[in-house]
Amino acid sequence: MKFSNLLIPTLKEAPSDATLPSHIYLIRGGFIQGVGSGLYNFLPLGKMVLDRVRNVVKEELDASGAQEVSLGFVTPASLWVESGRFEKYGKELLRFKDRKDNDFVLGPTHEEMMVNLVKQSVKSYKQLPLNLYQINLKFRDEIRPRFGLMRGREFLMKDGYSFHSSEEDMKREFSLMEETYKKIFTRLGLDFRVVDADSGAIGGTGSKEFMVLADSGEDTIVVCKSCDYGANIEAAKSMPYICEEEAPEANFAKFNTPNVKTIDELSNFFKVNPYYLIKAVAKKALYDGEREEIVLFFLRGSDELQETKALNSINANDLIDISSDELEEIGLVAGFMGPLGLPNNIKIVFDNSLIGGTHLICGANEKDYHFVGLDLELDKDAIVDDIVSVKEGDKCIHCGGNLVYTKGIEVGHIFQLGTRYSQPLKAEFLDENGKTKPFVMGTYGIGVSRLLAAIIEQHHDEKGCIWTKESSPFDVCVIVSNAKDEKQNEIALKIYHELKAKNINSLFDDRNERFGFKMKDYELIGVPYAVIVGKKVEEGVVEIVSRDGNIAKEINISNIIEAVAEIV
RNA sequence: CGGAGUGUAGCGCAGUCUGGUAGCGCACCUGGUUUGGGACCAGGGGGUCGAAGGUUCGAGUCCUUUCACUCCGACCA
């Protein structure tokens, strides 16, 4: 392609709202164009990258035996009503009516549609297993779109769904998908980790996320320094912590603690490690059908509540903060809450680490008083669960190594769904014995447009993008130093044609611009290699450079095609 | 949704306090010089100042309403 014929509107300045490198460079490089909150147009360069990334995804999935389909973007709401998600999915689901006043939604994910498709045509175990996927637009009316392609409202996603006659077979496919995803992200040149994850709104049991490691990632992940354990902070586990400091010896008693409210203050007041204090976190839990209740979470003072784990422990839809006024209304005192003598209309949850806890200090549910010397005895029916965040320095449950935090961009997520959708939607088949059974399902997602952002987050410098081999819009860029110089032009054009003949995807910067201007554009756009045709053509020499700065050498014109063919 | 802020040329901004011919840089068009690191000179085009209403002889500027967008917190590929 000739640069002069392409629409590549590069910019010196980025829009003021762009903060991440990927957002800034994708816009400045003329890859994408913002059109509204969380909505982007893909310009020619962006479309090329998108197609290349999409191709890698497609090739690997097809190789794994999955089959591509394309489902309608507009989905009849009736399917969503059937699965119960029409109400439950919330405001992220964009709903609208057609001229006949029928309800529709723009698909944010396609479990319903895919189950529906399969249920119409698959009736027998002989047709299983089946893995169907599509790479299509999704729309989620995000509360706060940001970071360019990283969190848009409209985005390109690969979503796959597998159907099986047994749990074992579904697990086999799940592993196959894990391997396939690893191949995809490796081919794209990404540094990533596969981590244990929370299954969230989609549901199901085992679930794994594919995280591209980058400081700008929105997720905190916990990784082990000694083995390959990794988990989203929402699902991370660590070995039980044992406090080496001595426990405060005291007989059970009520103690006057005037105005001592926080864990820090309490720890100072009694001169004890926060490990021996009971922290109480009050939240309001929201459930289906507008039902809500107050929940108190009790944990060690040295721990932090992990909201997702907390949410899962009580099977609620959401946890929201609660004001101290609301607490007072039900007879609780902020800063002095404890597990003893609570009003009976609130739910309580204990963290695992409190089981069998002794010599504890906790709030007395009375202003300015705490209990000391508490040996915790839990009711049989008390909820006990893992509800705290793993901390840096905690020990790995697999190898005992040190756990540390890092940030990741979620680019893929695979779930073992089981029969969560097939059952309510009555998607069933006949097994070997002629018995009706619901499909056992798995579901697998990849954020394709987000991948472009993730690649740039991991591969850029202060000058612009540095595309990886399989994601770059072009393999090489041929740059004419002085476009008015006939000899340079002639040689460059010849090199360009020969590269093309060799099936090397080349961009020819033939614009009548100064050298520096074209180099800045080259660096901004980030094609991995450039052939620079300049003054030295008189001596029969051109230059080859790599965008990452690792190569810059002069090459005889007669050898240039081979030299390029070798590296791209 | 809670808190903060911004809407002026394609992009980045000034002008608003104190009402009086709508500006600057980049980009764009024409001509010329320049050609190994975002060049220079000369000339030029482009705006219903987010929208609606009001005050006023006169509103980008003051008042009211409204919409959009951005940033900080809770969701997700």
Image (cartoon, rainbow, N blue to C red):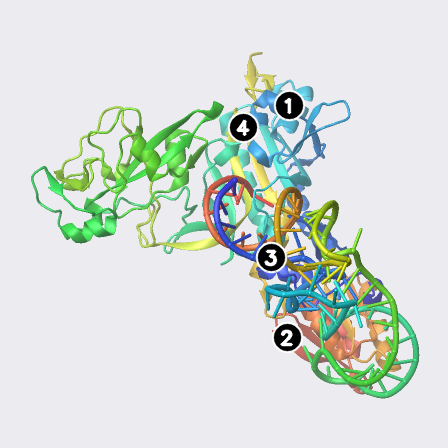
Q: CA distance from mark 4 to mark 2?
A: 55 Å
Q: Report, in whole angstroms, how far the alpha carbon at label 1 lies from the one at label 4.
A: 13 Å
Looking at the image, the residue that sits furthest to the left is: A251
Q: Earlier in the sequence, mark 3 or mark 4?
A: 4
Residue at coordinates 30% horizontally, 50% vertically from top-left?
Answer: A395
Residue type marked 1: Leu
Same subunit, labels 4 and 2: the answer reads yes
The numbered dot on residue A79 is 1
Mark 1 Cα-neighbour bin, 10 Å: few <14, some 14–19, many ≥20: some
Give percent across and percent down for residue B38: 72, 78
Q: Is residue A564 above or below residue A436?
A: below
Check the picture and name the quadrant holding the C terminus of chain A.
bottom right
Which structural element holds mark 1? helix
Residue A28 visible within the image = yes
Q: In whole angstroms, how far apart are the C-alphas of marks 1 and 2?
A: 56 Å
Q: Nearer the viewer, residue A501 or A317?
A: A317
